[in-house]
Amino acid sequence: MRKRKKFFGFLSSLLVLMLVLAGCSGSDEAGSKTSDGKVKLTINYYVGAISKGSMDAAKKAFPDYELNFVELPADSNYDVKLKTSLNSKSAPDIATVNSNIQDFLPYADKFVNLLDHDADKIADQYVEWKWEAAKTGDKKSMIAMPLDIGPTGLFYRVDLFEEAGLPTDPKEVSNLIVTKEDYLDAAKKMNEAIGKPMFLSAVGLLGEQYRALDSGMYNEEGELTLADGQLKEAWDFVVKAIDAGYTLGTKSNSIDNVNAINEGMYGAYIGASWGVMDVKDADKSAGKWRIAKTPGGYSNQGGSYLAVLGNTANPKEAVEVVKYLTNEESQLANLTENSLFPSLKSIYEKPEMVSKDEFFGGQDVNEYFIDAAENITYVYRDTRDTSAFTYFEDQISLVESQGKDPKKAWDDAVKKAEVLK
């Protein structure tokens, strides 16, 4: 028995030692200091979210810090890994968060509250709607600062518009296609004149309409409102387009879409500023695209944030780095290298914002994106918004591809949204 007590005493001591060592290891991994006394910070970001120029400048600006930038794939696993890491000692000090920032607001206590570090003193420098979206509902906590935004414009095929008898100059198109009804009328004219659909897909068209709504799927009391009834209007608009044969039925972000663009199989879509790079994947269509003002209301699609995770050993220093990586110098580098549209209003007056692009016939492609960025309004998003809207995307896809009854499809989507927790 004595030996046994001695063994358990040794084991207990060993466990305590292991826990202490584990605690030391976790603290170091979360970012304390290097052996030569530098503040150590790890910054996880997904591909393309931060430019090399911005990262290099930050390293020079903070010579007493060791900044380790870790690039990760921009896939669906990114959010899962980030959420999992919120309780991990091996989490990064800083991480990018995508435009679905409302999904992370319920975990605000796992992030450093930037309002405790005077973030609001520079709030007026950024577009308000993007800034406010990073705050909790009670506005007492802010979990991230905006890196970039994705204001939208109407991308259209100038050759197909000409064949259909529609205007081709961006200003004339902006003046003719103002409302969503005008958008549908233009689709009708194209279909009747040259027998081609205006829109890529029902899912794409529903997403375009949803992003322009001035309210979310739920109100601030957590009640399902379906954008105060506006979602049903958007749904009916898309059903009309399907019934009339104005949708091609091809998925976006697919090789089929690249082929459809190259072959001129559809006429237009509402896309974000970063879409300027995407459309160039279809190189056979060079010179045939222009960008006009988004019909039916200003909207945004995408744009990233930078957040400081709550378990960092160096919150003050990490916030300094986040403020630097979202300042004017950094956003200009992101704009020129990665075509990321700035969230800082001061940059809209800079010569770097004039981007005459031969792929778009020499047009300044940023003109209508700036107009959108300055006029988008803040929309409250519940943490369930993204999941709830997916039900409607799934159902409208069935209407288009399998001829499902639109009313039953709508009812099925509503039923799922009603029980979403």
Image (cartoon, rainbow, N blue to C red):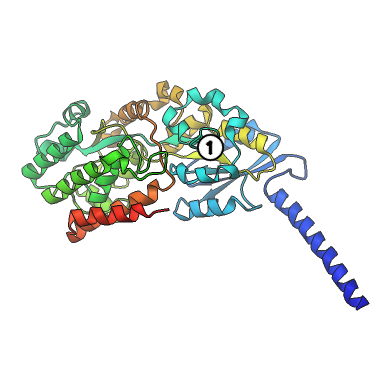
Q: Nearer the viewer, residue 64 or 248?
A: 248
Q: Nearer the viewer, residue 258 or 348?
A: 348
User: Is residue 27 positioned above or below 174 on the image?
Assistant: below
Where's residue 49, x and y in %? 48, 42
User: Is residue 232 positioned above or below 335 on the image?
Assistant: below
Q: Residue at x 78, y 57 (%)?
A: 21
Q: Nearer the viewer, residue 273 or 63?
A: 273
Q: Residue at x 53, y 37 (%)?
A: 144
Q: Is residue 374 left or right of residue 115?
A: left
- Work out whether residue 201 can be spotted: no
Disc 1 residue type? Ala
Quadrant position of the N terminus in the picture: bottom right
Residue 355: name its quadrant: top left
Category of crowding for the residue at label 1, using alpha-carbon neighbours closer than 10 angstroms: few (below 14), some (14–19), many (at least 20): many
SS assignment at label 1: loop
Q: Nearer the viewer, residue 407 or 87?
A: 407
Q: Residue at x 20, y 30 (%)?
A: 178
Where's residue 164, x and y in %? 10, 39
Q: Residue furthest bottom?
A: 1
Q: Residue at x 38, y 36 (%)?
A: 150
- Work out whether residue 62 can be spotted: yes
Total numbered circles: 1
Where's residue 79, x and y in %? 49, 51
Where's residue 334, x and y in %? 47, 35
Which residue position is annotated with label 1?
144
Q: Residue furthest left?
A: 192
